[in-house]
Amino acid sequence: MVSLDVGGLGEFLREQRRAARLSLRQLADAAGVSNPYLSQIERGLRKPSAEILQQLAKALRISAETLYVQAGIL
């Protein structure tokens, strides 16, 4: 069974968002998710699906595989 390291993923997403100089709202809009949902992912309270990870990766201009590894999917 694959465990999901949500806290590590959230921290990684926050770092990538800040490196891209995007606000939480800007990334949420670009990825097609709500601002509160993205905030919960970053704080480790929610487990995003592979589809959401792919949308976030596209908005951040990083590979989806990078996020899958951070999430413990790959």
Image: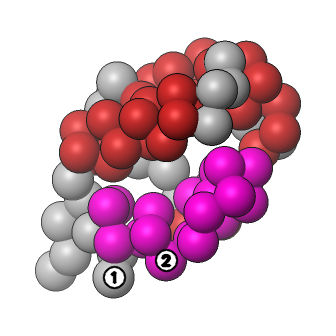
Whole-percent x and y of residue 29? 83, 30
Q: Quarter holding the N terminus?
A: bottom left
Whole-percent x and y of residue 65? 49, 77
So how many labels did they put on this image?
Answer: 2
The colour mode here is secondary structure
Whole-percent x and y of residue 60? 66, 49
Which residue sits at x=69%, y=58%?
61
In the displayed structure, does residue 67 sit left or right of residue 45?
A: right
**Where is mark 2, residue-wise?**
65
Relative height, residue 6 to residue 72 (above, below): above
Q: Is residue 29 magenta?
A: no
Which residue sits at x=57%, y=71%?
64
Which residue sits at x=34%, y=24%?
43
Ranked by sequence position, the earlier of labels 1 and 2 is 2
Relative height, residue 63 to residue 61 (above, below): below
Picture quadrant where residue 30 is located: top right
Which stretch did the figure color magenta? Answer: 52-71
Identify the amino acid type marked 2: Glu
The one of 61 and 37 positioned closer to us in this rendering: 61
- Asked whether the beta carbons under mark 1 and mark 2 sit within 8 Å of each other, the answer is yes
Q: Taking the image as drawn, is residue 10 in sight?
A: no
Identify the amino acid type marked 1: Leu
In the displayed structure, does residue 62 sit left or right of residue 33?
A: left
Q: CA distance from mark 1 to mark 2?
A: 7 Å
**Where is mark 1, residue-wise?**
74
Characterize the magenta stretch by its predominant secondary structure: helix
What kind of element bears circle 1? loop
* Tag in front: 1 or 2: 2
What kind of element bears circle 2? helix
Could you say which disc has been placed on residue 60 in the image? Answer: none
